[in-house]
Image (cartoon, grey):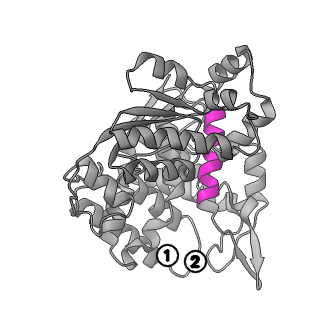
Amino acid sequence: MSLPIECPEPGQPIIFPSGPWVDAMAACMQDPLHHGEGDVWTHTKLVCEALVARPEWARLSPEARWVTWVACLLHDVAKPETRRVEDGVVRHPRHSARGARRARRMLFDLEVPAALREQVVNLILWHQVPFFAIEQPDPEDRVAKLSLTTRCRHLAMVNRADGEGRICEDRARLAENADLFFALAEDQGCLDAPFRFESVHARFCFAQGRSASRFDAPPARPRCTVTLMAGLPGMGKDHYLARHDVGPVISLDGLRASLGAPSSGGQGRVLAAAEEEARAHLRAGRDFAWNGTNLTRETRGRLVRLFTDYRAHVRIVYVEAPRSVWLARNAAREAAVPAAALERMLERWEVPDVTEAHEVEWVTS
């Protein structure tokens, strides 16, 4: 497996990368109470060493070894940009979420395949959860939901290494909680696969907080199917729609043109027209597609709520091409999106996951 970030072979010496992001981590000191080892890069190297030293890591597939290695390598990549000193205490608020987004961009630029990239991203996003999940209310539900977007075995391994790669007084408690998280996921049958729900609708309702328990199975009587497209401009959404019969297509670009609205700035008129068209289809129980970039979870969530209020079955189709292909396609377009606009979109970009709709399909090339 040839990937742009080198992963050590089991039993072989570790060669750590270098670069500006490494320099930033090395210059970022942490709170001594939780990180007596000092700076973020020193901690990161200890975490990586702890991961590869565990016999179970060597038994993983090459792809899984790479995913867990890169997750450990980048798990605190956003600590330098989130560092705060409050009342003499060093904190890094939301460094997991910021780090996940930063890692997505780094790995996209390196053209890591989307499936592997998003495994790394989700491990970074949730890497702290096993430290405290077992101590929170309803840990079984928390583990079941996590299993939908990440492999709990890999998450437990990354988390355990994170606890071992530091100097602090509560290392024993962190290790115990990581082991309890592992055991809980194993007991629920979701250590190496997603938790099994009675139906996709039951899974959707649980993931969206619409059912009180993962064992609730609300009846599913969809009146129609809505295909919600998602992806950066020029990735191939129009091409996908041209090749699949999904019913009438509500195109935000088309509505902008017909309304004479600008491509940036306030889009209230465009969205209002699109939503009214969608409601007409929903009231008629007619299948249709909504075509737009829909780059953030918040944007998609608002639309999914609209569609499901009319008892629609919602499928999100996410389209992605490698960075070099995408940039070449954009440059060849009659109305190419300016580089600055693409950069702003990349800063907001969130890839859809299975917790957002009844179905989520990735179309990658």
Q: Residue furthest bottom?
A: 87
Residue 250, percent across and down?
Answer: 52, 32
Residue 185, percent across and down?
Answer: 29, 61
Instruction: Name the residue: 61% across, 37% down.
Output: 107
352 lies above or below 252: below
The residue that disc 2 covers is 168
136 lies above or below 104: below
* Most foreground residue, 257 or 164: 257
Instruction: Name the residue: 44% across, 77% down.
Output: 172
The Cα atoms of the two marked residues, 2 and 1, are separated by 6 Å
Instruction: Give the extent of the magenta segment.
Output: 97-110
Label 1 element class: helix
Q: Is residue 225 left or right of residue 215?
A: right
Instruction: Name the residue: 22% across, 63% down.
Output: 216
Q: Is residue 141 left or right of residue 347?
A: left
Q: Mark 2 Cα within 10 Å, few/some/many (few <14, many 20+)?
A: some
Does the magenta-highlighted stretch encompass residue 103?
yes
The residue that disc 1 covers is 171
